[in-house]
Amino acid sequence: MIFLDAAATTPVRREVLEAMWPYLTGEFGNPSSHHTLGEAAANALADARATVARSLACRPGEVTFTSGGTEADNLAVKGISLARQAADPRYNRVAISAIEHPAVEESARYLERFHGFIVDVVPVNRYGQVTPEALAEVVRPETALVSVMYANNEIGTIQPVAALAAVAHHHGIPFHTDAVQAAGWLSLDTKTLRVDALSISGHKLGAPKGNGALYLRSRTRVEPLVHGGGQERGRRSGTENVAGAVALAKALTLVGAAEQGEPLAAKVAGLRDQFIKTVLALVPGAILTGHPGERLPSIASFCFPGTSGESVLLELERQGVVCSSGSACAAGSDAASPVLLALGIEAEVAQTAVRFSFDSTVGSAELEEAAAAVGAAVGNIRSLSGR
Ligand code: PLP
């Protein structure tokens, strides 16, 4: 099997499993317990927090561990907006881009449904980028938060995060970015990005599903969503997932180590470009979606007019290539992706979308094989449907 769906999830790396193993077995303590087992767990948690903080160029106290990217996004969007509204009821708007992951979009819609917020949607250009000018047109004195993702999960387009954060800050508005797909490929230096909040998720990086983190710049007020024993400095109650935190820290370290050893992102970007070139050559009429250059090294996304995305997936799986039609959340649905519609792609064409996403171990031979399979699969489907 050639697995080209790493944007959906990745296998747990052996080194990560080995790092977390002690905290699932012998060192199983609760970090809040006042005995040696508890202290060992608390130390492991503190070390993991310090490691994550190094990857994000922030202080350990600015890292909140969560149950994943979705919870980190929810805590940022709802938590920051509600805290600002509690301090000043005039804050009743949130601005998000038109191509956010549902974890951000639905959090904003929750604020609209239950807290009287107005959701301002910032349009994207045909490559899926939010321009600083487009954002400047949307923000208002009542905007509590701006949230624009770092890189998109369906088309891989990278946003000019620092420039967008500057627009928000110019108006005194905090800025959150969902960096779930960017992590592992792009710098997560929160100082250079100039963000106030940033979400990451472990399972896109070789850690298990169900753990992530939210960076919250110190003095950024946040209303907790999960109430209880006051763990995570009161921001997220519940006995901490120590092994998960250790796993996330290890996964981030491995990504950093790989980057220093060789320019991994550049290498994978080269393989991606070759794959895109081959697919476009083999499939007449194929359309590359997203930005041609400002895109994640790990994502190649296309529309194949004259097919349906789902039929291409099935045909490819028969040939041993596993990929997806867009986001894993929308898998199995033949509805056009809202992300592609926001780019101005017609619904009929958007329904033919296929996303190929790579992890750091991807090789050129398997991509060549996969590209040939794509050419054959699309050709078969088109000839069967007489197009
Ligand atoms: N944000 C983006 C951009 C994603 O791609 C995903 C996962 O697909 C999430 C958030 C949600 O992360 P998690 O699966 O850890 O909840």
Image (cartoon, helix red, strand yellow):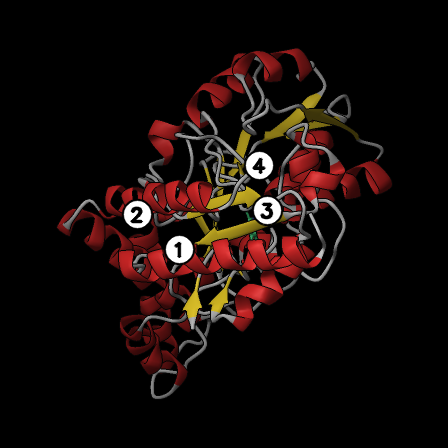
Q: How far is the residue under mark 2 from the one under mark 3?
A: 31 Å
Task: Tell me the quadrant of the picture where the N terminus can be found.
Answer: bottom left
Residue 73 numbered mark, or none: 3
Q: Position of residue 366 (x, y in %)?
A: 33, 62
| Front: mark 2 or 1 | 2
Please name the residue shown 46% across and 47% down the image: 181
Q: Identify which amino acid the numbered label 1 is placed on.
A: Phe
Q: In which quarter of the view is residue 115 placed?
A: top right
Does the CB distance between marks 2 and 1 fall below 8 Å? yes
Query: Which residue is tagged 4?
Result: 221
Query: Which residue is tagged 2?
Result: 271
Q: Identify which amino acid the numbered label 2 is placed on.
A: Leu
Residue 338 numbered mark, or none: none
| Front: mark 1 or 4 | 1
In-image side of 25 versus 93 (left or right) = left
In-image side of 355 versus 255 (left or right) = right
Q: Position of residue 380 (x, y in %)?
A: 59, 59
Confirm or reject: label 3 Cβ below 8 Å from ligand 1: yes
Q: Identify which amino acid the numbered label 4 is placed on.
A: Arg
Q: How far is the residue under mark 1 from the one under mark 4?
A: 36 Å
Can I make out residue 105 in this image? yes
Q: How far is the residue under mark 2 from the one under mark 4?
A: 42 Å
Secondary element type, mark 2: helix
Q: How far is the residue under mark 2 from the one under mark 1?
A: 10 Å
Q: Position of residue 145 (x, y in %)?
A: 63, 29
Q: Residues within 10 Å of mark 2 (few under 14, many from 20)?
A: many
Query: Which residue is tagged 1?
Result: 358
In-image side of 367 versus 259 (left or right) = right
Can I make out residue 59 in this image? no
